[in-house]
Amino acid sequence: EDKVVQSPLSLVVHEGDTVTLNCSYEVTNFRSLLWYKQEKKAPTFLFMLTSSGIEKKSGRLSSILDKKELFSILNITATQTGDSAIYLCAVSSGNTGKLIFGQGTTLQVKP
Amino acid sequence: DTAVSQTPKYLVTQMGNDKSIKCEQNLGHDTMYWYKQDSKKFLKIMFSYNNKELIINETVPNRFSPKSPDKAHLNLHINSLELGDSAVYFCASSQYDTSNYGYTFGSGTRLTVV
């Protein structure tokens, strides 16, 4: 059965810290891996990764995919309280557009 | 100018009732989805329609019935509501092509069954 596993499930850090969130997957017919940030409402898109080894960067956030070892990491440097959220990893499988989500990592950044 | 809009945002209802949630997208996407997020924040796909055709139908009780009158709308009707149906239901849309499955999510409908 297709599976996406995130770790840690929750994390508490202080402003200025750097965090690394992990996502591993076992999915047939992999197409892409996506990261989302969820605050109070809808998940908002962060990154989509399709190729191994190519880092995607947006401000203090960056992500990379390893298709051989079947995992991805999301890095956040110089964390701010506004980074507090649930970070969701999802894998797109097959040709239907279906996303398989991990359990999410709840990040709390304290002042 | 909301891209994916769901109504209602909150729904509190008694067990055994029938209720509907509506979703509309104005992005011109051809594929729409319903996801359920449980109390542990785990998001799981329920249904997907591509150009009004059902393409994903996960293991969901048949009390749940999606309807897509056109490619901009996807509604979810739930019969005989049960306590375990309490969750946040998210609608999403995407453009079905071979290179990009970037989704846009609606803001969710929080369903509470009492």
Image (tube, coloured by chain):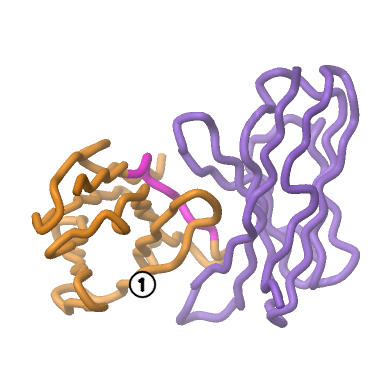
Q: Mark 1 points at which residue?
A: A48
Residue at the extreme left of the image, as rendered = A17
User: Chain B is shown in which shade?
Assistant: purple
Looking at the picture, tell me which residue is in the foreground, A1 or B65: B65
Q: Identify the image quadrant of residue B22.
A: bottom right
Label 1: state its secondary structure. strand
- Please tell me which residue is depicted at 49% across the width and 57% down the height of the picture: A43
Q: Mark 1 lies on which chain?
A: A
Q: Nearer the viewer, residue A108 or A20?
A: A108
Q: Residue furthest front?
A: A111
Residue B60: horizontal and vertical position, in percent?
68, 35
Q: The chain shown in orange is which? A: A
Whether A110 is drawn above or below A97: the answer is: above
Range of residues picked out in magenta: A98-104
**Of residues A32 and A40, the one drawn nearer to the viewer in this rendering:** A40
Above or below, B35 relative to B32: above
Confirm whether the magenta stretch covers residue A102. yes
Q: In this view, does A75 lie to the left or right of A31?
A: left
Q: Position of residue A89 (x, y in %)?
A: 35, 54
Residue A85 part of the magenta-drawn span = no
Q: Is residue A43 above or below residue B41?
A: below
Residue A58 placement: quadrant? bottom left
Task: Residue A67 in the image: state x and y as whole percent.
Answer: 20, 64
Residue depicted at x 17% and y 79%: A54
Name the amino acid type tagged 1.
Answer: Met
